[in-house]
Amino acid sequence: MSEPPEEFIEIPLIVDPARDGFRLDRFLSSRIARLSRTRVQAIVDNGQVRRADTGEVLLRASQRVRAGEALVIRRPAPREPEVVLDYREIYRDEALLVIDKPAGLPVHPSASYHRHTLTQVLRDRLGPGHGWDMAHRLDRETSGVMVFGRRAGSATALKKAFLGREVRKTYLALVHGSFHEQVRIDVPLGFAIGSKIRIKMGPVPVAAGGLPAATTVRPLRHGEFNKMPVTLVEALPETGRQHQIRVHLAEIGHAVVGDKLYGLPEEEFLKVVEGGRKLHELGAQLGLQRHALHAAALTLPHPASGAEVQFTAPWPAELAAILAP
């Protein structure tokens, strides 16, 4: 019996002005953060990068790309990890869609996920022309409330509300250790200085390019996980930096339970990025296959009426089994 034909995916990339003049390998590395320079070189050498308009294959990693160029990477379709390919709809009207995203479901395609994404689930469930545009993002392992507006319509108002800090966000998290007093963490953030992991964030002074970031954290309940103390906390971010709550909690010595990036020595995560170790093995090491961070509530001005509305998502069962709110 003949082998089934190998499936491929095509990843379109537009060269933005900030990357004008980049070497091809540097551009690809910057756009697909999880790809190492070695893997990028192999992709180029194998003729998997071409121009979208002419179909010309780009074979030199050193050649320069120009702003506005449209490139396409053709790669074998990855064997994607199993995820919950669903979501719970919390609310919908003509201008607003609110969902409860499950943990483990990535929002957008990446090096490891192409079809197993919230973007694809929305297409499958609502149709390819559904017209909803997400107003913000959640990390893959973070569950909870996400809001969407109409593309070229109410989505613009929602995004402005997030940027203008008109949206109040409430997160719940399980953290390591016994945490007893409310604290406001005011630590500017940027890409982690000295880290070998491109996606890792860390404290960076504003003078060195860091962005202001502040989170208020309040303890709610105490318990145990794997015979060690844990605390259920409420986290109220005043800003919306990448990985903000996870980094801030790790910085005060109370990393989120199950956090593979900020709750373990960097060398452990590098074994996944560069050494071929499976991500679920880190989850087994931590005792939890997701990090224990949940977007519990969002309060925002409705994009059509302007009236303040609030939406909530319940604490997930797998986390309630460790410690209930």
Image (spheres, helix red, strand yellow):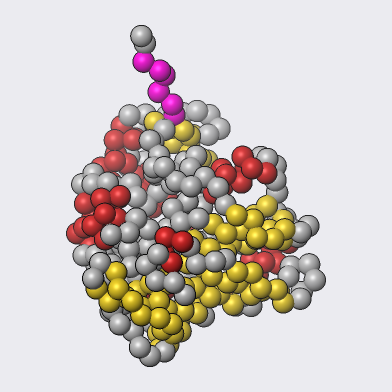
Q: Which residues are magenta?
A: 3-8
User: Relative to 246, is 185 above or below?
Assistant: below
Residue 239 pos. (x, y %) = 51, 77
Name the residue at 34% across, 35% down. Answer: 44
- Relative to 68, is 26 on the left or the right? left
Is residue 7 within the magenta segment? yes
The residue closer to the viewer here, 6 or 179, is: 179
User: Relative to 131, is 141 above or below?
Assistant: below
- Relative to 113, is 261 on the left or the right? left
Is residue 213 within the magenta segment? no
Name the residue at 44% across, 72% down. Answer: 324
Name the residue at 29% across, 69% down. Answer: 225
Q: Quadrant of residue 73?
A: top left
Residue 208 pos. (x, y %) = 35, 77
Q: Quadrant of residue 253?
A: bottom left
**Majority secondary structure of magenta residues:** loop
The residue closer to the viewer here, 315 or 9, is: 315
Q: Quadrant of residue 310?
A: bottom right
The residue closer to the viewer here, 88 or 211, is: 88
Q: Residue furthest top?
A: 1
Residue 202 in sight here: no
Name the residue at 24% across, 73% down. Answer: 228
